[in-house]
Image (cartoon, grey):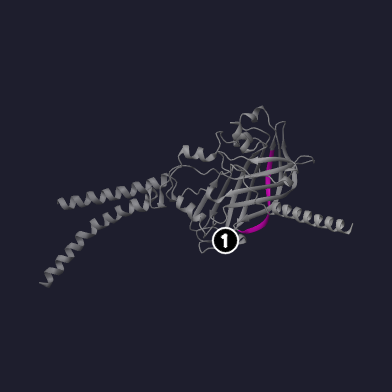
Amino acid sequence: MRNGNRMASVVVVLGLAGAMWIAGASATGKAERTESGATLVIPADHASLGKAYYVLTGKDAQVTFASDAPLEHIKGTSSKVVGYAVVDNSGEAPAIKAGEFHLPIETIDTGIPMRDGHLQSERWMNAAEYPDVHFVIAETRDAKLEKETDEFRTYSMTLVGDMTVRDETREMKIPAMVTLMPASERTKFRAPGDLLAIRCDFEILLSEFKISDMAVGLKVAETIELETRLFLSTVSPDEMRKSR
Amino acid sequence: MLRWIARIVIVTCCLAVMVEAAVLWRATGAEGYTKYPKPAEEESAESGSEDGGLSDLFSDTGLEDAHGELEELPNKFALGLAPSGPDKHVVSLLTLAGPAGLAALLTLVMPALGKRGKKNGASEE
């Protein structure tokens, strides 16, 4: 009996440790890419929270950044963000219960190949060691319906999560507009599945992420402005590729 | 006389190159560094999607109301003030107008330097 109780205790402790490890891995992000690399594998504990939407890469630019420094004005863009968002529609307003987005540094295009190389270098983003910037959504707050028709609903809300640049992680609260558009005759010829769009602007202070260089303040702004627009679908990019 | 005409022609041509380079720089956006457009095939291949963008599908949903439309960076050639690389990116206002300006300057200055040299030589004799 005593041995049985001891065994049960060990199992419980191991189980808790395992759950904590899984939760920790989810909370700190870095979901793995699928085999094709077209999207991320959604952890089981996230998938169970609601309806999963996958980021679609495409012709539209997804992230645009601007650095406005006294000696140089730099703009860059990427359309290769991958990720997912899990939405719970059961409440009065939808809530993004979990999400993770990866922006590969090597996909950022400033229009000048040499500058792109500098951006990826160890001096700046160190893409060799930290290939992605990633944002993990923990929750959404203050969701408010802004516009609604039979075909869509648009909400304003605040995305709360952890932004990781290189090896520094900071919590960020990002005001966003989110549109949910169920599949319809209008959408099915453009993209399969229910659609979700996220639009937000935010700023990153380089010093907060321990990025410092003598060029900061002169050729690179201390604060980088980012504009983001992501389109997501309940049909993952991998499924879309299979159906083509 | 002929030498004088030749100098005028050379300086005029050099000034023309400098002015045209400056006009091209302004006309292509007055960028700091030279940029070349990404070929359409490369762009669509990179996009990983055969479909066009989805932005027009959401154009009347209010998605852009709070933050405005996402800025699209132009994918076109721009002559820069300075070169941005050792390959075709070396073409710039500086590398076009610079040599022309130097040639014009030398054309104007060298004869005067030559005359001074002769005067010094004559006075020493």
Q: Which residue corresponds to the image point at 67% horizontal and 51% vertical from the top-left?
A: A136
Q: Does residue A176 belong to the magenta stretch? A: yes
Q: Is residue B62 visible?
A: no
Q: Residues within 10 Å of mark 1 (few under 14, many from 20)?
A: some
| Chain ID at mark 1 | A
Left or right position of B49 against A46: left
Left or right position of A117 against A9: left
Instruction: Give how far across and how far down residue A203 sits, in percent.
Output: 62, 54
Residue type at mark 1 is Ile
Q: Residue furthest left?
A: B125
Q: Residue furthest top?
A: A185
Q: Nearer the viewer, residue B44 or B5?
A: B44
Q: Which residue corresponds to the image point at 59% horizontal and 62% vertical from the top-left?
A: A210
Instruction: Quarter of the image for the C terminus of chain B: give it.
Output: bottom left
Instruction: Give how far across and how far down residue A172 sits, in percent.
Output: 68, 54
Would you say the magenta stretch is mainly helix, strand or loop? Answer: strand
Give the number of marks.
Answer: 1
Q: Which residue is mark 1?
A: A211
Q: Does residue A83 belong to the magenta stretch? A: no
Q: Which residue corresponds to the image point at 57% horizontal and 36% vertical from the top-left?
A: B53
Q: Nearer the viewer, residue A41 or B35?
A: A41
Left or right position of A217 against B114: right
Depicted A184 relative to depicted B106: above or below: above
Instruction: Give how far across and how far down residue A242 sits, in percent.
Output: 60, 33
Instruction: Give how far across and how far down residue B70 sits, in percent.
Output: 58, 43
Q: Nearer the viewer, residue A214 or A42?
A: A42
Q: Name which quarter of the figure residue A51 lies in.
A: top right
Tag 1's secondary structure?
A: loop
Q: Nearer the viewer, residue A151 or A243?
A: A243
Magenta residues, start to end: A167-179
Depicted A155 relative to depicted B119: above or below: above
Q: Residue furthest right?
A: A1
